Image: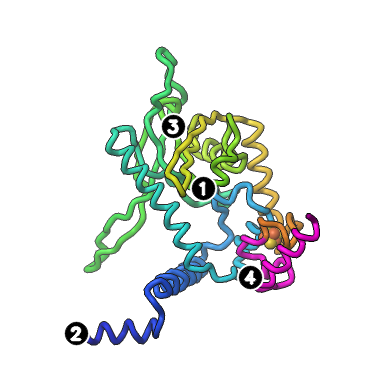
Amino acid sequence: MSLKKIHQIKEKYGTDDIVEMVHTFLTEENAQNQQRRIEEGRLGKFYPSSVGRCQRAVAYQMQGYPTKPINGQSLLIMENGTSFHNRMEDIFERMGILIAPELSLKHKELRISGRSDAIIWNFLLDKGEPPGEEISLFRKEQVEIQEGDELKKVEEDIEVYRGPNNHILIVEFKSIKSKNFHKLPKTKPEKKHEMQLQLYFKLTGIRRGLVYYENKDTQETKYYFVEYDEAMVEETIAYIKDIIRYVDGHDLPEREGNPLDIMCRYCDFRNICHIPVSEEEWLSIYFDEQEDAA
Ligand code: SF4
């Protein structure tokens, strides 16, 4: 049995070292997940974390354009972001302030079907503040149901909170690079993150929240308190509706960057949006350009 297992591993990874094996595995797993999303008809959905991204990139994603394969290193960085969420939710739970680690979000017209980060008790509530509007919030949970002789797993909406909307806060966790952490504005989060929270306010009825940042290199943390802002909610909705209009017309918004912009370099759709160049070519063009400009 053990020799058979070792043989299978060698067959799959050949002479790769353990780092290359991890990267290969993650890249393949990500490609399979992407394929599954397409097969399950999950194209055309708008993900709240896309708010503020280049509209053309979001339209590519919603229409199922192929992305360049995501390398193992980048996928490890993403896993680190997910671990930050899980870690914080676990700490909030142990502190006794967590209500739910996530909420299920739905909006037919905005093509949203996803989930938020955590909701917690509003420790900032002013003494004597009257209860706000009553809301109900749900999260998706897998439950087992008996169908004939078979036990099937299905997702169901489970109520996690019913009560005044000012007694809770919604928290969005963001794990970012040291360079960006030190560039964060003084009083507000990055605009795209504030827009994401405003979208959550619109979808849930909650009116206050936090954007909670971690410097992924040092684990320093910083948070910003955000309140419902009608004008920003409108701006966010207009941004999403604009993209949906292009998607429904099988069209694409204008490019928001040129091939040498950093936003395009890290965009998954770079090679279909601009003339395809390899990573090495891009680096040589980029650095020559910077030197010419100096
Ligand atoms: S390559 Fe640049 S312009 Fe094109 S979709 Fe990506 S970010 Fe937008």
- Alpha carbon of mark 3 to alpha carbon of mark 4: how far? 42 Å
Circle 4 residues within 10 Å: few <14, some 14–19, many ≥20 = few
Q: Which residue is mark 3?
A: 169
Which of the two discs, 3 and 1, labels the residue nearer the N terminus?
A: 3
Circle 1 residues within 10 Å: few <14, some 14–19, many ≥20 = some
Which of the two discs, 2 and 3, labels the residue nearer the N terminus?
A: 2
Vertical relation: 75 (above or below) 98: below
Q: Residue, x 63% and y 31% (percent of image)?
A: 230
Residue 22 percent location from the top left of the image: 40, 70
Vertical relation: 17 (above or below) 226: below
- Alpha carbon of mark 2 to alpha carbon of mark 3: how far? 52 Å
Q: Is residue 106 magenta?
A: no
Q: Which residue is mark 1?
A: 176
**Which region is colored magenta?**
265-294
Q: Nearer the viewer, residue 48 or 15?
A: 15
Question: Along the horizontal axis of the image, is 158 left or right of 280?
Answer: left
Q: Is residue 289 magenta?
A: yes
